[in-house]
């Protein structure tokens, strides 16, 4: 009898609560998690459902299938809650994994609550300026909200923790392509919920931006059309009441198994070898290492400030057989176009620096001479104009000397536009560059194209 009363109490608690938005759009963002009482705090109302302080294992004995007893709004709320994780491509996370919790919270804020970031603080990490941040207190509140836990403050990949604040790369835009649908729900003996779900992919973000869309109602594939199933998973949730119009759950654990075990890693890479195309040695090493950087930045999205505007390329800048990774940032600060350059050395990826172009575009070109494996770009030296040319350009040649990124000022058309006079003492370099001025811009691929073609296919576009 006590179990029946407990079940009825839990159902009454969540009945009638409408879920907030899953994919928040700037024009119509809705709160879905917390009732904010001050800058960082939340008002939390104790639930009548009993809860253990210990995390629930997915092996916990289940009590009863309650899928058919939940109404449409309750199913909707759980679909919305789980989609918080699938939209950020999170396949595995628990309330004990501090690093993944931090990563999730920052991504969730970035996509759904961008206005929670402050622009009042700035810091520089590895030569890159970060201007978006939140306080550690606010992040802890979010950890409490989603996972009912506190985390150890720390930096996680591109998310930096410094001076009691968390910093996120300067980025804007949306990249939400996955959502979750419940298939069945059991209530465990301790009152927690074990949920089976499927994750679906869509390229039509606009159709799924509104959490009120029919796709978020019903079990499994109900109300879906041609969306592709990415995988299946299970999750353990606890009910915790935060107020009306909120998704009243916290996550204990979530595990999603992709239908294709090689999805989200390069074609031909196995979890055991991590070697693209079965290669060994240098080729496998740099491919996997660069892929790790690419993946850690949400598949290239955060390699620069503006999501999906980056372009990627490979170019061996010192003839050592290992190409450098080129990341084009076409509109850095609206003035300079940067080519961020990375190399693989001593078993890890290292940031070398930036190749600059003035005028809002990075224009890398190869030299028609194998003795000069680097790239040349055009740089406008503001204020250097003359009567013959009010807007002169310099040609800068960038190369990697095995230790640092170097550049040589090759020539300038200061006196007459388009007629480049030699500046460098290296006559051979000057002649090689001048003979290469008609070359097309070095081939780079937008990160969206790289995601579509796959990492191996991208690497195969180059000769290395």
Image: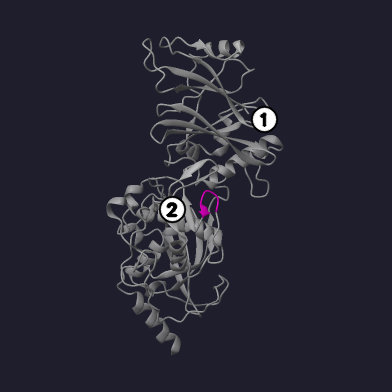
Apparent side of residue 200 relative to residue 223 in the rendered image (left or right)? right
Q: CA distance from mark 2 to mark 1?
A: 35 Å
Q: Is residue 161 magenta?
A: yes
Question: Which residue extends farthest left?
Answer: 27
Residue positioned 61% across, 19% down in the render? 372
Residue 275, quarter of picture: top right
Q: Is residue 224 magenta?
A: no
Residue 87 appears in view: no
The quarter of the image holding the N terminus is bottom left
Apparent side of residue 11 relative to residue 281 in the rendered image (left or right)? left
Q: How is the image coloured?
A: one colour
Q: Which residues are magenta?
A: 156-162
Q: Residues within 10 Å of mark 1 (few under 14, many from 20)?
A: few
Mark 1, secondary structure of its residue: loop
The image position of residue 391, as x and y in percent, is: 38, 18
Residue receiving disc 2: 133
Residue positioned 37% across, 53% down in the render? 114
Residue positioned 48% across, 53% down in the render? 89
Apparent side of residue 76 relative to residue 290 in the rendered image (left or right)? left
Residue 59, quarter of picture: bottom right
The image position of residue 45, as x and y in percent, is: 37, 77
Front residue (pair 400, 19): 400
Mark 2, secondary structure of its residue: strand
Question: Which residue extends farthest right?
Answer: 281
Residue 3 appears in view: yes
Residue receiving disc 1: 402
Residue 292, quarter of picture: top right
Q: Is residue 34 above or below residue 454?
A: below
Q: Is residue 186 above or below residue 449?
A: below
Q: Is residue 84 above or below residue 294?
A: below
Q: Is residue 357 above or below residue 95?
A: above
């Amino acid at each position: 009898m006590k179990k029946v009363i407990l079940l009825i109490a839990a159902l009454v608690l969540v009945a009638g609560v409408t879920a907030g938005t899953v994919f928040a759009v700037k024009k119509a963002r809705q709160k879905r998690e917390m009732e904010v009482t001050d800058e960082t705090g939340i008002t939390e109302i104790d639930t009548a459902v009993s809860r253990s302080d210990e995390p629930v294992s997915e092996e916990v004995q289940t009590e009863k299938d309650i899928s058919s007893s939940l109404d449409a709004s309750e199913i909707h709320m759980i679909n919305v809650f789980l989609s918080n994780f699938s939209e950020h491509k999170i396949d595995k996370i628990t309330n004990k994994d501090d690093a993944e919790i931090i990563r999730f919270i920052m991504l969730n804020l970035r996509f759904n609550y961008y206005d929670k970031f402050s622009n009042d603080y700035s810091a520089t990490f590895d030569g890159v300026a970060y201007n978006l941040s939140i306080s550690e207190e606010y992040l802890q509140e979010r950890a409490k909200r989603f996972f009912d836990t506190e985390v150890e403050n720390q930096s996680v990949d591109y998310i930096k923790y410094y001076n009691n604040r968390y910093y996120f790369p300067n980025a804007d835009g949306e990249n939400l392509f996955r959502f979750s649908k419940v298939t069945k729900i059991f209530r465990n003996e301790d009152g927690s919920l074990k949920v089976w779900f499927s994750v679906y992919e869509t390229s039509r973000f606009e159709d799924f931006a509104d959490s009120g869309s029919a796709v978020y109602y019903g079990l499994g594939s109900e109300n879906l059309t041609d969306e592709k199933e990415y995988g299946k998973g299970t999750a353990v949730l606890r009910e915790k009441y935060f107020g009306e119009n909120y998704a009243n759950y916290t996550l204990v654990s979530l595990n999603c198994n992709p239908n294709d075990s090689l999805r989200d890693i390069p074609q031909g890479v196995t979890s055991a070898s991590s070697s693209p195309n079965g290669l060994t040695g240098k080729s496998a090493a740099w491919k996997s290492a660069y892929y790790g950087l690419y993946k850690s930045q949400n598949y290239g999205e955060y390699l620069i400030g503006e999501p999906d505007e980056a372009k990627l390329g490979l170019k061996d800048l010192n003839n050592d057989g290992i190409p450098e990774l080129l990341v084009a940032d076409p509109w850095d600060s609206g003035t300079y176009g940067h080519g961020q350059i990375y190399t693989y050395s001593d078993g890890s990826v290292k940031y070398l620096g930036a190749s600059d172009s003035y005028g809002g575009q990075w224009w890398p070109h190869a030299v028609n001479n194998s003795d000069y494996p680097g790239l040349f770009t055009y740089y406008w030296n503001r204020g250097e104009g003359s009567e013959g040319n009010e807007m002169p350009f310099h040609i800068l040649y960038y190369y990697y000397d095995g230790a640092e990124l170097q550049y040589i000022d090759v020539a300038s058309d200061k006196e007459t536009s388009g007629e480049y006079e030699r500046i460098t003492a290296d006559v051979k370099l000057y002649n090689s560059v001048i003979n290469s001025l008609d070359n097309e811009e070095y081939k780079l691929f937008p990160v969206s194209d790289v995601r579509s073609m796959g990492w191996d296919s991208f690497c195969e576009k180059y000769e290395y």
